[in-house]
Structure formats: C-alpha cells, structure tokens
Amino acid sequence: MCPKSSSTEDSGDASHLIDARIGALNDWRGETLARVRALIKQADPDVVEEWKWRGVPVWSHAGIICTGETYTKVVKLTFAKGASLDDPAGLFNSSLDGNVRRAIDIHEGGWIDEEALKALVRAAGALNASTRAAKKKGA
C-alpha cells in the first residue's frame, strides 16, 4: 500500500500502514517498532496513530507525542516537545542540542526502560493537552 503524499491518513488507515511497515521490516527494527508502539498505546490508550511525511509513524494526543522512524542502524523515537519533558531515567540520547525536540535512538540488541518510556509518553500527552487548553483559554 502506498501512502498519500505528505498528508495524514485517517487513524484506521494509519494503523494499517504502521502494521505494514513493521511487517516489511522483518528484522529487529520491526520488532523494536512493534514493541515501542505497544508501550505507547499502553501508556496512553487515547493515543491516535497517524502516518505523515511520506511514511513516518506518528503518535498524537492533543498534538504530536512522538514519531517512530526506522533507519538501517537505529529505531528513532523523536518527541516533538522533548526538551520540555523531564527525563529522570536519561532515555533521551539524540537530538540533545535542539531547543524543542529530543530523541531516543534504539540500536540492535539495545533496549530502554519500559516504565520510563511510558512515563515520557504520558508526560508528552499531558503537556500537549495543557498547551492546547491554554491556547483555547487565551483565544
């Protein structure tokens, strides 16, 4: 299935496209993407799956929580507002110099603290919701 240009697919289509991506990877990257996807959904049952930018899985709740990019040597979870999130477990290990985003690079054979990841996802969703509420209040 070929995704539409850079538009967002509806949630059902996006979920199928993410399933297809995981299946097509057929290696540690697919397994890793599937596992982080499950953790994201556990952390935020109201998360919306999207498919953007010509093939990037995106998880949103009142705004983008994170993306799940797959490269040859890494699965990268990029948190849209990661610089504003507390990361007591030190999961963020990439894109540390930016003012907004932060990322977690997961390499083959590597893994991260699942509870810490779920806490980041919940915090990102809460930050998005509070930002959206503040914008509505000020409008």
Image (spheres, rainbow, N blue to C red):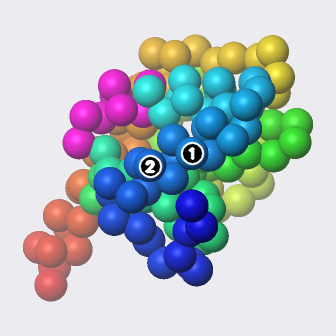
Residue 54 placement (x, y as % from top left): 63, 70
Q: Look at the image and tell me whether residue 2 can be seen.
A: yes
| Residue nearest the observer in this picture, 40 or 13 | 13
Residue occupying the far right of the picture: 73
Q: Residue at x 77, y 27 (%)?
A: 27
Q: Which residue is mark 2?
A: 16
State whether the magenta stretch is mostly helix, strand or loop. Answer: helix
The residue stretch that appears in magenta? 39-46
Amino acid residing under circle 1: Ala
Q: Is residue 120 above or below residue 103?
A: above
Residue 95 placement (x, y as % from top left): 75, 50
Helix, strand or loop under label 1:
helix
Total numbered circles: 2
Picture quarter with the C terminus:
bottom left
Contact check, label 2 and label 1, Cβ < 8 Å? yes
Q: Residue 89 vs residue 61: left or right?
A: right
Q: CA distance from mark 2 to mark 1?
A: 6 Å
Residue 133 placement (x, y as % from top left): 17, 64
Is 41 contained in the magenta span?
yes
Picture quarter with the N terminus:
bottom right
Amino acid residing under circle 2: His
Q: Residue 131 vs residue 1: left or right?
A: left
| Residue nearest the observer in this picture, 83 or 2 | 2
Q: Which residue is mark 1?
A: 20
Q: Residue at x 88, y 37 (%)?
A: 73
